[in-house]
């Protein structure tokens, strides 16, 4: 019997086991005995609950909308800091962050941090629905096809955590399909002149769809380890810190702590390739810059530390954004799962 799956072979061995044959011959089989068999031998392979697809979409979509409202300005600041090629100091910090609105009023400066909100809304909601709603799906697929291998190779606890992390990595790789919206959002935040007076249809017509997938390989290379660390770090915390058998039963506080661990690990692991990806994507459409050329130039002119440029601000201000949305998604998906 494959642990956790009920097959015809299980029925055969149940019906023809010596103890059951004796029971049937004596005419004393009871529903209670059948229930004991069912409950002990048909338990799920892992102690986690599978929510419905609707619950996953509602929970992850709500987290994406809430994150967008609260953190879009923070994301703009982080992207502009990462795109800055000059030495950053207190003297030029305002210029780097606020660009053309550097001399505007406080209200004008704040509004200037909301460029590309339309693209950001489409990207962020779609990304969160796909990432936080899709990871459990990949987790189910891995468990169905390779769950026994993970558990037998790494043990039940470690195998379960690695399945969560691997599912996250696969989800991150597939996230590349949303790259055009991410590219447009980044350009609006860091290089708005490239989009001035052009809608998305006109952009595709003039520049080609391929231009919106610029940096796709580096995006996948960044997402794979980053998402592995995000979901793996969260699972590690729930498993070893909070001793949870069912991750969906974590409290808001436990989800928050698990999200902090996963987010810091994810941002740190993905930082070098994230800087490369951002620099590729914020160039003009007619500038074809390869990732290796960017890396070579960074090492030559800025040094190896440039790969972690903006890491501290990103952990401090972008980290909470990821923690915020991931905590919401982890808490809201089981919540909606009670009703849909």
Image (cartoon, rainbow, N blue to C red):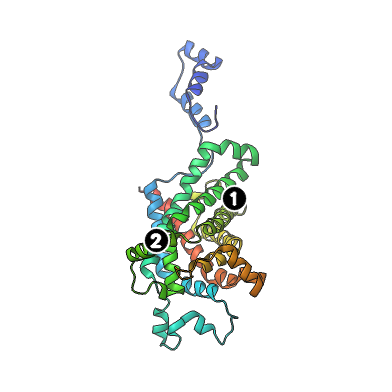
Tell me which residue sits at (64%, 75%) in the image.
301
Residue 108 in picture, x, y percent from top left = 39, 84
Question: Dot 2 lies on which element?
Answer: loop
Q: Closer to the camera, 96 or 333?
A: 96
The answer to whether residue 213 of the structure is visible from this angle is yes
* Label 1 Cα neighbours within 10 Å, binned few <14 / some 14-19 / many ≥20: some
The residue at the far top in this view is: 25
Residue 161 in picture, x, y percent from top left = 58, 47
Residue 208 figure quarter: bottom left
The answer to whether residue 302 of the structure is visible from this angle is no
Q: Which quadrant is the N terminus positioned in?
A: top right
Q: Closer to the camera, 199 or 75?
A: 199
Q: Residue 45: which numbered mark, if any? A: none
Instruction: Give the side of residue 262 with respect to residue 334, left or right.
Output: right
Residue 43 in picture, x, y percent from top left = 51, 34
Q: Nearer the viewer, mark 1 or mark 2?
A: 2
Tell me which residue sits at (59%, 66%) in the image.
293
Instruction: Give the side of residue 182 with respect to residue 244, left or right.
Output: left
Instruction: Give the side of residue 293 with respect to residue 80, left or right.
Output: right
Residue 101 figure quarter: bottom left
- The answer to whether 340 is drawn above or below residue 86 in the figure is above
* Label 2 Cα neighbours within 10 Å, binned few <14 / some 14-19 / many ≥20: few
Q: Closer to the camera, 300 or 169?
A: 300
Q: Residue 208: which numbered mark, if any? A: 2
Label 1 vs label 2: CA separation?
A: 47 Å
Q: Residue 239: which numbered mark, if any? A: 1
Dot placed on the residue nearer the N-terminal end, 1 or 2: 2
Question: Dot 1 lies on which element?
Answer: helix
Residue 169 in picture, x, y percent from top left = 54, 51
- The answer to whether 237 is drawn above or below residue 292 in the figure is above
């Amino acid at each position: 019997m494959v642990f956790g799956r009920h097959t015809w072979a299980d029925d055969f061995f149940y019906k023809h086991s010596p103890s059951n044959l004796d029971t049937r011959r004596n005419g004393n089989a009871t529903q209670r005995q059948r229930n004991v068999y069912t409950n002990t031998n048909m338990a799920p392979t892992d102690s986690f609950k599978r929510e419905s697809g609707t619950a996953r979409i509602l929970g992850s979509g709500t987290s994406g909308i809430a994150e967008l409202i609260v953190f879009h300005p923070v994301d703009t600041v982080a992207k502009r800091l990462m795109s800055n090629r000059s030495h950053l100091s207190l003297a030029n910090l305002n210029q780097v962050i606020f660009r053309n609105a550097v001399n505007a009023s406080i209200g004008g400066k704040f509004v200037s941090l909301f460029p590309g909100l339309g693209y950001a809304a489409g990207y962020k909601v779609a990304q969160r629905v796909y990432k936080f709603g899709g990871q459990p799906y990949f987790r189910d697929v891995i468990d169905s096809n390779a769950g026994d291998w993970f558990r037998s190779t790494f043990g039940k606890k470690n195998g379960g955590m690695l399945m969560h992390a691997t599912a996250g990595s696969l989800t991150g790789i597939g996230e590349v399909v949303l790259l055009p919206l991410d590219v447009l959002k980044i350009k609006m935040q860091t290089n708005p002149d490239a989009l001035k007076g052009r809608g998305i249809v006109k952009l595709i017509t003039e520049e080609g769809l391929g231009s919106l997938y610029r940096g796709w390989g580096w995006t996948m290379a960044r997402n794979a380890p980053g998402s592995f660390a995000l979901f793996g770090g969260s699972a590690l915390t729930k498993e070893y810190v909070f001793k949870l058998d069912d991750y969906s039963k974590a409290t808001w506080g436990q989800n928050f702590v698990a999200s902090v661990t996963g987010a810091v690990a994810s941002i740190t692991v993905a930082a070098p390739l994230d800087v490369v990806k951002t620099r590729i994507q914020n160039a003009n459409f007619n500038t074809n810059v390869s990732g290796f050329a960017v890396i070579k130039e960074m090492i030559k002119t800025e040094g190896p530390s440039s790969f972690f440029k903006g890491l501290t601000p990103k952990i401090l201000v972008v980290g909470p954004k990821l923690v915020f949305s991931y905590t919401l998604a982890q808490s809201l998906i089981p919540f909606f799962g009670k009703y849909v």
